[in-house]
Amino acid sequence: MSFHCSAFTDDLNPCLMTCLDGKDVCVLHKDFYDPEIWFERFIFSIDRLRYVFSSPAKIQLIYKKAILDGRIQITRDHFRDLDTSHNPASLVDYYLLCCKQPGVDPFWSNMLFKQTIKTILDMHSPRVHDVIVHNRHLLDRFLDPIFSNCKWPFDYMMAQVLFNILNINHPGHQLIDHPTVSLFQYIKSHPKYQGELLWKYSVHEENLLVLLNKGSLNSVATEKVKAFVSELPAQRAAHREKCQKANQAMKQEIRDAVWKPEWYLDHEEYSGLVSRWGINLKL
């Protein structure tokens, strides 16, 4: 069985030569995904910025095929090398792509994590915000890899992001709570916000609130973040009450079905319960 080569040519185009015996690359590119060679060429080489600015779509495809497909494994040591190699602003997109690889910890590089927070605030600047309102992907692409990272729970990542924005003096603080497209709106609409955060007590949330109440940080950001975090207990209680009411009808019908005198459900009754509540009753 033959496959097409997954490497790229010198002009950054897919190779597509035929590979035999289930190999991932052709004979000409047998060392293409060797970590030392790949990192040196596409990350640490002086040609990297030329690639990024002259062929951004091509270099992004090369990064995705290497990192998201697991051909290149990202390690803590690699992030340490990033910290000492380039202007951090030029590495944010690459860093966030790395954070999508399973097992990668965003905090392996505090420098790039903080640079990402600054970039998120840049997206909230008045001169930029009108653009992201019409194309929210421009903001979400910086937020998704951080908040969907599996290394840390959602409440911890939220607390870390909110704490770090307090330590940056930035005009974007004015719009982080914009109701349509913003950091706060993103957090509230994230599946883990309702599926995880609103179902549990969070010590990280409490610790952040303690820091906010000290009142020694940036005033604009502090007031907005404090208002957001202070509302969470009430939202948590309201969410649980809403879910309890929504589940009450299901609970009552299942109870009646299980404890009916016949002690069994016929096929029609069973199918009705499954279709209404999306459950699998083993009676």
Image: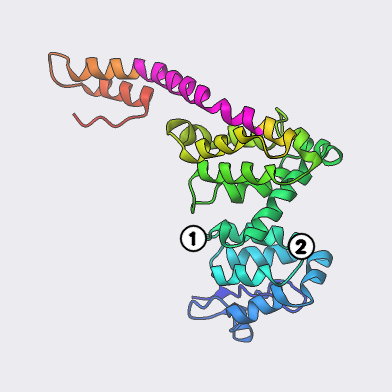
Q: Which mark is residue 103?
A: 1
**Camera-nearest residue between 82 and 245:** 82
Q: Amino acid at mark 2?
A: Ser
| Residue 159, picture quadrant | top right
Counting the numbered discs, the total is: 2
Is 240 colored magenta in this rendering? yes
Q: Secondary structure at mark 1?
A: loop
| Residue 87, picture quadrant | bottom right
Q: Is residue 125 left or right of residue 270?
A: right
**Camera-nearest residue between 221 and 145:** 221
Residue visible at 64% across and 81% down in the picture: 37
**Camera-nearest residue between 20 and 29:** 29
Magenta-drawn segment: 225-249
Here the colouring is: rainbow
List the single residue furthest toward the bottom.
27
Residue visible at 77% across and 33% down in the picture: 174
List the single residue furthest toward the left.
262
Q: Is residue 265 left or right of residue 15?
A: left
Q: Is residue 72 visible?
A: no
List x then y, in percent, for residue 256: 23, 14
**Camera-nearest residue between 95 and 173:** 173
174 relative to 96, above or below = above
Residue visible at 83% across and 64% down in the picture: 53
Residue visible at 68% across and 30% down in the picture: 223
Distance between mark 2 and mark 1 Cα atoms: 23 Å
Q: Which residue is mark 2?
A: 90
Q: Residues within 10 Å of mark 1 (few under 14, many from 20)?
A: some
